[in-house]
Image: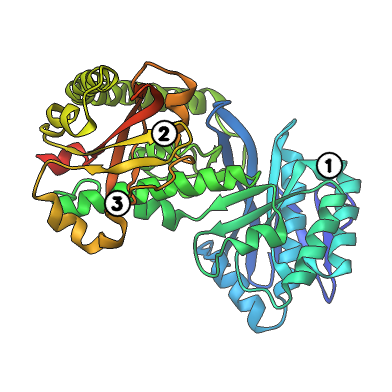
Amino acid sequence: MVIANPEKTTISARNFELSVSSGFDRYSVDHGELTLSSMFQPVFSLSHMRAVGYEGLLRAHDTLDRPVSPLDVFGQAARVGEALQIDRLSQALHLENFKMLGAQTEWLFLNVHPGALTEPYHAAALLANLKRLKIEPRRVVLEVLEQRAEDIERLAEAVQQFREHGFLIALDDFGAGHSNIERIWQLDPDLVKLDRVMLSHAGHNVHAAATARWAKQRRNMEAVLSGIVSLLHEAGKLVLIEGVETEHEAQLALASGADFVQGFFFARPSPGLADSVHAQTIISDLTERYRLQTEARERRVATRLQPYVRAFERAAERLAAGEPLEEVCWNFLALDNAARCFLLDQNGRQAGRNVVLRADRAAHEARFMPLVDAQGANWLRRPYFRAALGDPERVHVTTPYLSINEALPCVTLSVETRAGGKRCVLCGDLDWLAEDDEE
């Protein structure tokens, strides 16, 4: 692509040439009966509370200035064998307009078709455009569409070559279509964009979830969203959640631990830079509400746990004084949601069976009968065991997790103590139903 002058130029896209006219602040392209232009949707860092990048989006209008969906533009191009040419054209157009945007350090996110990445012609054209516009490759994030690729190994090699030039790589639309975790290992992206479908499932029926079933499903999806973000972080990937449209979805994105967000709630696509003051205000207010909600929830949890912790401390004292496990746990187990007590030696091995008081647990445990007898089980890997040994003489409380005993949400209390003159860890499980499940 060669710019002859700011008023009129020509973009060459292999087998056809398109006339380009520049307006006051951006370029547009006349392609057949369509006029193509660029819009930029900001990508915000929740921690920095500002835009750190802009995704180039294609916009099209017909001769009557009616909007035409980008999907229709690319669909028609695919039908006539010009998909890759239109792909290159839109990228060249976005680069021209990004240069005019005046962004100083922010990234430009460019959608790229997998087929375009594997063609040497595309890489050469993209690098030539960047050199001419004096945009360094490190400022460009190539979004690889999450779709079936004919040759994933060839695509992975092409992605690596672009990375060696300095580009960042993002895996787009993860969580929809042909998504699978294997694609993360194959393409090794720097960023992963979670598709809106994951966010919408987590926030589904937030106002209509009157039943315990809907509420439980919503909480499960929220936990899954946070778990996926955590998994991607463990894999060394930054995470962007796209399609954030409501405040509730923004709160979900913030609570999930995602690094970046994108969507109408924060800013709509625009031909210009994001309003930095407006963005900072929105994210600051969102973060403050999250802080208040988190602190309120922590206070409710502490109040809820208080009687269990007191009873558990007394049980540990009695155990250290020489009373048998079967006797010291009764006050703890008499509380509504107490499930079981058990004792671990200093190596994490369970001494004796679980101590259970409530007869109604038998129905819950029947389906998991192979797991009921835990005598001799090794719980060395469990955080509650390691925490108790690392900080003795204090009751530790885990975050909710899935109990292996009944595949139900559980919280475990643990404390390092002594029994029979030997160091040990006393543990107590609570059924951890959400507050609205208990009402």
Numbered mark located on residue 405 in the image: 3
Rendered position, 359 above or below 184: above
The residue identified by callout 1 is 135
Between marks 2 and 1 in the image, the one whose residue lies nearer the viewer: 2
Which image quadrant is residue 82 in? bottom right
Q: What amino acid is at disc 2? A: Asp
In the image, 294: left or right of 392? Answer: left
Numbered mark located on residue 321 in the image: none
Q: What amino acid is at disc 1? A: Ile
Rendered position, 120 above or below 141: below
- Spot occupied by residue 126 in the image (x, y as percentages of width and height): 84, 57
The residue identified by callout 2 is 345
In the image, 54: left or right of 215? Answer: right
Nearest to the observer: residue 402 or residue 201: 402
Q: Taking the image as drawn, is residue 12 in sight?
A: yes
Distance between the alpha carbons at the discs numbered 3 and 1: 57 Å
